[in-house]
Image (cartoon, helix red, strand yellow):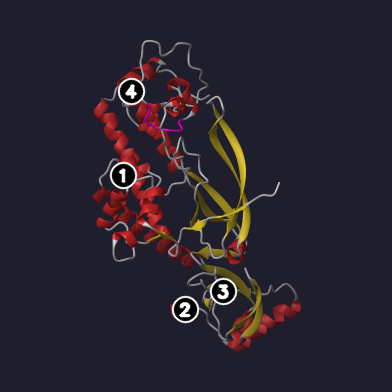
Amino acid sequence: MDFKDYYTVMDVERDASQDEIKRAYRKLARKYHPDVSKESDAEARFKDLGEAYVVLKDPEKRAAYDQLGADLKAGQDFQPPPDWNAGFEFSGSDASAHSEFFESLFGRDFGSAQDDRRQAGFRARGEDHHAKVLIDLEDAYLGANRSISLRTPEFDSSGHVITKQRTLSVKIPKGVKQGQRIRLSGQGSPGLGEGHAGDLYLEIEFNPHSLFKVEGRNVYLDLPVAPWEAALGATIKAPTPDGLVDLKIPAGTTGGRKLRLQKRGIPGEPPGDLYVVPTITLPPADNDAARQLYRKMQQDLAYNPRSELGV
Amino acid sequence: MIQKTFTGVLLDERAELSLVELSRACSNSTEWVIELVDQGVLEPVGPEQARWRFSGTSLLRARAAMRLQHDLDINLAGVALALDLIDEIETLRERLGRIETTANR
């Protein structure tokens, strides 16, 4: 188990006052709150911060933690000495799901839940669970079934916490967008006593696609076209998540200009559009015939691509 | 073993929840949800409380409000302000993303 340096997590000196700790917590909590921050590790940092604050805001816990020794570094292998907290008394539990490090020092919250459970009439709604479900863009067009593995803490007959793995098959409806959530009512943790079970929230995330980019319900495709197709116009085959389509390229198409295929994006109310962005690619001049064609164009077209730059 | 396939509710604009359903999904009281409506955080459709309908996105917003209120110890007016600013940043980020993609083409 790794030692966690709560002072580093909170960015305060070891002799910081309780007020300083409170201020540091509030400042960092606003910064790393997962609803506010878009940084990928915000959730983990926010959890570490909450854990550090639970320990450092409580003078008893902080004194016990300080006793572990200032020479321990974050990440260092750590085992709490036996009876390390003798003489300190902890009361209450005000956060859930702490790190292994925290639990080895201050115990698990589940302990108190077990006691509560035996009291007659106690009820609590089960915890909600959150999971991400990865789908392909094509699944959003057609709908799909996905199996999701979840690990849920449960109480066994003797009241101990065990982690149970279960697999759910979930229907992904047609027309979902990136980041949308699906709620499965009652599929979270079971409630205690008469309490309702929690809910399961699934967040839709698309696997990156080699051809298409997605923005909301709109889908983008970079489509290579030959110079003569762009100049003269052509009907060419283009892939869409829905299958191949015949696409008409108007004469005089320039690279980067978007061609919109209405309602060919992700289905829905309203359906998205598919944007084809032509990229004009040049045939290589790697043989005499090709070189001659390029030379002929150079002579006959009198084309200056830089005329607007005045050169 | 035959596996049951679960069909959840897609939390989009079309999903509809009542006041009671929404407060239950947030493990909170109906009074708390009503206050969110008073603060303009949630905008239900319907003439009177008993017939209010909330969209699926309202549920996500209410849950974000709940987390902000609890984790950052701010009152609901502050929560409302934070959510509006977060939305605005989100819109600007999307716009920036689009501009950057076009610029790189």
Residue A308, image quadrant:
bottom left
Q: Marks 4 and 3, how far apart in space?
A: 59 Å
Residue A72, image quadrant:
top left
Hey, what amino acid is under mark 2? Val
Q: Is residue A4 in view from this perspective?
A: no
Q: Which circle marks residue A264 in the picture?
A: 3
Hey, what amino acid is under mark 1? Gln
Looking at the picture, how far across and down is residue B100, in whole percent?
A: 45, 63
Left or right: A221 in relation to B25: right
Q: Which circle marks residue B69 in the picture?
A: 1
Q: Earlier in the sequence, mark 4 or mark 3?
A: 4
The span shown in magenta is: A93-98
Residue for badge 4: A14
Q: Chain of mark 4?
A: A
Q: Is residue A189 in view from this perspective?
A: yes
Hey, what amino acid is under mark 4? Arg
Q: Marks 3 and 2, how far apart in space?
A: 43 Å
Residue A90, image quadrant:
top left
Say which of marks 2 and 1 sits in front.
1
The secondary structure that most of the magenta stretch takes on is loop
For mark 4, give the secondary structure: loop
Q: Earlier in the sequence, mark 2 or mark 4?
A: 4
Q: Which circle marks residue A311 in the picture?
A: 2
Q: Give the residue displayed 70% in from the left and 78% down from the top.
A: A291
Say which of marks 2 and 4 sits in front.
4
